[in-house]
């Protein structure tokens, strides 16, 4: 299993493929970010897509109906006048945070196309090796391990790895 470090929460991306470009600016006069605009159909598609992704895998599924209600209310109200992608993302993120109280879940915008996520069923050996080296340098998120008075074990852990990977790797490292 490949670590999913980027999927601590649920992150959505809005790239140039998801926006309509304004044709009023002369070529080269403004950057892609300055020319990018969102229309009503694109805003709806983005909100519907975000809600669908939350329904598929948000860690707190009981919060999804309230988040969806807030986002749909935004589509019918305050999002209607927002054509700037960053302003739209900021408004949506504000609504998500107000309902979910989860800062790990957010919409993000980039003026450049966002590359697709790799197929989770295909293991990228180079990525796996890079992740292994990263975690080894950080001692597999175990900051401190010691025995306290009374033979009490103490572990300071700054993160959790998938158990099928963490146990074997930590055991190999500490028992070699």
Image (cartoon, rainbow, N blue to C red):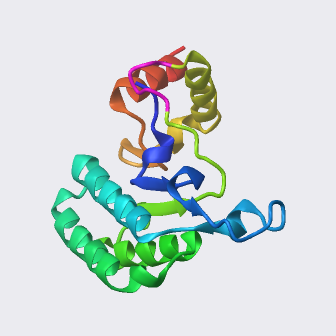
Q: Which residues are magenta?
A: 118-123
Q: Where does residue 102 sit, x and y in percent of width and height?
A: 37, 67
Judged from this view, the residue extending furthest toward the top is 176
Q: Where does residue 83 sit, x and y in percent of width and height?
A: 53, 75
**Residue visible at 26% across and 70% down in the picture:** 67
Q: Is residue 51 magenta?
A: no
**Residue visible at 42% across and 73% down in the picture:** 92
The answer to whether any part of residue 17 appears in the image is yes
* Nearer to us in this view, 99 or 24: 24
Is 61 placed left or right of 9 in the picture? left
Is 90 placed left or right of 152 in the picture? right
As drawn, 156 above or below 111: above
Q: In which quadrant will I find the N terminus? A: top left
Q: In which quadrant will I find the C terminus? A: top right
**Residue visible at 52% across and 42% down in the picture:** 141
* Nearer to us in this view, 125 or 121: 121
The answer to whether any part of residue 145 appears in the image is no
């Amino acid at each position: 299993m490949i670590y999913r470090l980027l999927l601590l929460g649920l992150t959505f991306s809005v790239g140039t493929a998801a926006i309509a470009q304004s044709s009023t600016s002369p070529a080269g006069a403004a950057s892609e970010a300055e020319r990018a605009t969102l229309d009503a159909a694109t805003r709806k598609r983005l909100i519907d897509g975000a809600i669908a992704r939350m329904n598929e895998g948000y860690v707190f599924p009981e919060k999804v109906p309230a988040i969806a209600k807030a986002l749909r209310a935004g589509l019918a109200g305050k999002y209607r006048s927002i054509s700037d992608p960053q302003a739209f993302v900021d408004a949506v993120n504000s609504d998500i945070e107000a309902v979910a109280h989860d800062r790990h879940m957010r919409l993000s915008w980039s003026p450049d196309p966002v590359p697709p996520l790799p197929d989770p069923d295909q293991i990228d050996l180079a990525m796996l090796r890079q992740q292994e080296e990263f975690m080894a340098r950080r001692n597999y998120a175990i900051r401190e391990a010691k025995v306290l008075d009374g033979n009490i074990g103490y572990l300071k852990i700054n993160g959790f790895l998938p158990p099928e990977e963490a146990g074997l790797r930590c055991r190999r490292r500490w028992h070699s």
